[in-house]
Image (cartoon, rainbow, N blue to C red):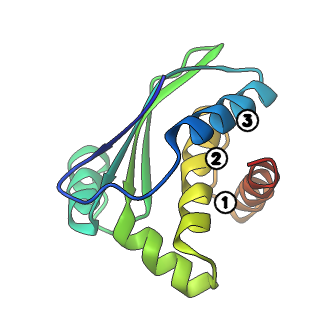
Amino acid sequence: MVRFVTDNIAMPTHDPARISRWISAVAAGYGFAVGDITYIFCSDERILEVNRQFLGHDYYTDIITFDYSTASRVAGDIYISLDTVADNAKNVGVSFDEELRRILIHGVLHLTGQGDKTPETKAVMTAKEDAALAIY
């Protein structure tokens, strides 16, 4: 089950049923069923708090994924800073909705085991995001 909640910020406009079906299709493509995934939409300040508290990082980010997946089922809590999503959308010249979809699926790809810490794995992640976005 995919859930969308907010943490002291307005809920972005989205189609939860369509996004849930899309996430299920993408996860299935990697051999996973969808378990409990909760997206927590928040501000830059909140994601910074989460980053400091749980990861020991002192910087802003667009997404933090807490992975509770098993061998066959993706599950996790995914924090998304809507402030950073908006900034990133402007910086790369896409709509907020398009950038939000990219970040939503980015979290799911992390849950399937995809990393993005090196230039090589980041390039693979971007290609997988593009492939997922093409079937939205």
Tell me if label 1 and label 2 are in contact, CB under 8 Å.
yes
Q: Pointer 3: residues within 10 angstroms few (<14), some, or many (20+)?
A: many
Give the distance between the C-alpha atoms of the residues marked 3 and 1, in whole angstroms.
23 Å
The residue beneath circle 1 is 118
> Horizontal and vertical percent for residue 4?
38, 40
| Disc 2, SS | loop
Q: Nearer the viewer, residue 128 or 36?
A: 36
Question: Disc 3 designates what residue?
Answer: 26
In the rendering, at what x and y percent does residue 99 appear? 58, 66
Categorize mark 2 by other alpha carbons within 10 Å: few (<14), some (14-19), many (20+).
some
- How many numbered discs sit on the rendered protein? 3
SS class of the residue under badge 3?
A: helix
Is residue 2 left or right of 123 when viewed as pictured? left
Q: Can residue 113 be spotted in the picture? A: no
Earlier residue among tags 2 and 3: 3
- For the residue marked with disc 3, what is the amino acid? Val
49 or 130: which is nearer to us?
Answer: 130
Q: Residue visible at 20% across and 57% down?
A: 49
Is residue 51 at least partly visible in the picture?
A: yes
| Of labels 3 and 1, the one closer to you | 3
Q: Please state which of the two labelled residues, at mark 2 or mark 3, is closer to the viewer.
A: 3
The residue depicted at 77 percent of the width and 21 percent of the height is 31
Residue type (three-letter) at the residue carrying disc 2: Gly
Disc nearer the start of the sequence (3/1): 3
Question: Which residue is the site of mark 2?
Answer: 115
